[in-house]
Image (cartoon, rainbow, N blue to C red):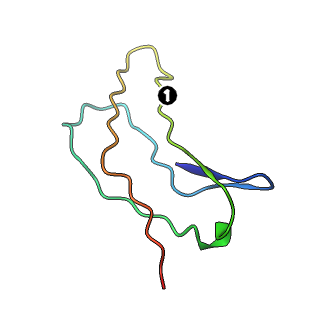
Amino acid sequence: MAVISATTGVIAFQEQGAASTLAAAYKTRSADITGFAGQTILVVIQAADNAADSLVEVAVDNVVVIRQP
């Protein structure tokens, strides 16, 4: 996942795949985006199938942005 503003961008987290078969599972991820406070941002979630014998399946659910006091 990347977070992009008008002036900067940062990869908040990245998960690399492996040449193996894995069962589907939901994972909880979080990222500190306080450096973007007060800015309009774009959250980019990207998946790529970059190998000849691979299959990438991606699901994103319940994206939440929480303002900390």
The x, y position of residue 5, in whole percent, is: 71, 53
**Does residue 46 lie above or below 56 as drawn?**
below
The amino acid type of the residue labelled 1 equals: Ala
**Does residue 49 lie above or below 58 as drawn?**
above
Which residue shows up at 34% across the image and 41% down it? 60
Q: Residues within 10 Å of mark 1 (few under 14, many from 20)?
A: few
Number of marks: 1
SS category of the residue bearing label 1: loop
Which residue shows up at 39% across the image and 37% down it? 18
Please give left or right for residue 29 compared with residue 9 in the image.
left
For this orientation, the residue located farthest to the right is 7
**Does residue 31 lie above or below 54 as drawn?**
below
The residue closer to the viewer here, 32 or 55, is 32
The x, y position of residue 57, in whole percent, is: 32, 28
Which residue shows up at 41% across the image and 38% down it? 17
For this orientation, the residue located farthest to the bottom is 69
The residue closer to the viewer here, 3 or 65, is 65
Quadrant in which residue 22 is drawn: top left
The x, y position of residue 14, in whole percent, is: 50, 50
For this orientation, the residue located farthest to the top is 52
Q: Where is mark 1, residue-wise?
A: 48
The x, y position of residue 45, in whole percent, is: 50, 41
Quadrant in which residue 64 is drawn: bottom left
The residue closer to the viewer here, 8 or 12, is 8
The residue closer to the viewer here, 19 or 4, is 4
Which residue shows up at 36% across the image and 31% down it? 19
